[in-house]
Amino acid sequence: MRGVVMHKAGDVRVEEREDPKIIEPTDAIVKLTATCICGSDLWPYRGVEPADRQVMGHEYVGVVEEVGSAVRNVRPGDFVVGSFVISDNTCEICQAGFTSKCVHAEFVSQTIGTQAERARIPHADGTLVATPGQPDPELIPALLAASDVLGTGWFAAVAAQAGPGKTVAVVGDGAVGLMAVLAAKQLGAERVIAMSRHPERQKLARYYGATDIVEERGKAGIAKIKELTNGLGAHSVIEAVGTQEAFMQAVGATRGGGHLGYVGLNYDVTIPGIELFFAGIHTLGGPAPVRRFLPELIQLIWNRTIDPGKVFDLTLPLDQAAEGYKAMDERRATKVLLTL
């Protein structure tokens, strides 16, 4: 089968990979219908993470082709959406709602690589969720978004306790940040402030429910959030970038006793303990437990209540994956969908 392999930083190729096979009785083989490039895929592309013939991709939807003897929840022919973290969905940690920290957790990006024609999904019963039927083609981008960015943005909004009567500030206007705007609106937030300097992303943020746009960053951004909230800061703040400036901006924008949900994959971010101490805020984040939210998100998409698929602003065939990486790296695209 064809699949994306990153040979080294900046060197992305589509080449022949071995076809996946059932190894464990809990496995499923999925023929992928669509996949995409994530902002976190840019870390190895930029040399921040090592890459040495690394299989790429962790967002995926497709049709089940084969299942192991122990699989009960999905069957051949089902159209499925999968989480970017493998989970059994039965261990104590999964049952507590943190499927991304399952005792069998395995990152799809590091071991499976779903920027490919097929994928072997371990613990299929706990990782894959079947849609109510075969989706119309126009629903596929939205369902693909649920595999990571929508689920991650949703978790961030839940972690920040976005809801009725709340003012929510979203730091970051990438795909996850935009999905966090959507989630905050769906969860009933009274006011959603999107922090963005990009005109097209501002437009999409407004479509998803942003009531205000703040272009300032750093201390100026914090000051603007406080100006908009009677000097108090936002009740709920979402950090969806993963840089030092973005994280400290998020901490500073959260009012005392407020909630910060952080989902930006970060490197070299150091949080001064004294600043966090005196901030007096609640914090929750990390790899999103997307599997926990998939049934609800799939139904919202299926009912056409939400359309997260608009976050894809460039569609390319799998063979042109290298161009997709380049476009995202140069911020010419927010998120790239790869067709198969």
Image (spheres, rainbow, N blue to C red):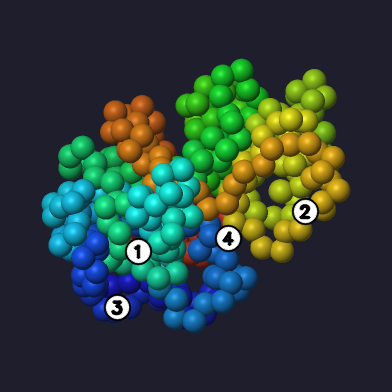
Foreground residue among 153 and 92: 92
* Spatial CA span between label 2 and label 3: 41 Å
* Spatial CA span between label 3 and label 1: 11 Å
Callout in the foreground (3, 4): 3
Q: Position of residue 277 (x, y in %)?
A: 82, 43
Q: Residues within 10 Å of mark 3 (few under 14, many from 20)?
A: some
Callout in the foreground (1, 4): 1
* Relative vertical location of residue 181 with respect to residue 91 in this rendering, above or below: above
Which mark, residue 330? 4
Residue at coordinates 62% horizontally, 43% vertically from top-left?
284
Residue 51 visible somewhere in the drawing: yes
Which mark, residue 114? 1
Q: Amino acid at mark 1?
A: Thr
Q: Amino acid at mark 3?
A: Arg
Residue on which the image places disc 3:
17
Give the SS element for disc 1: loop
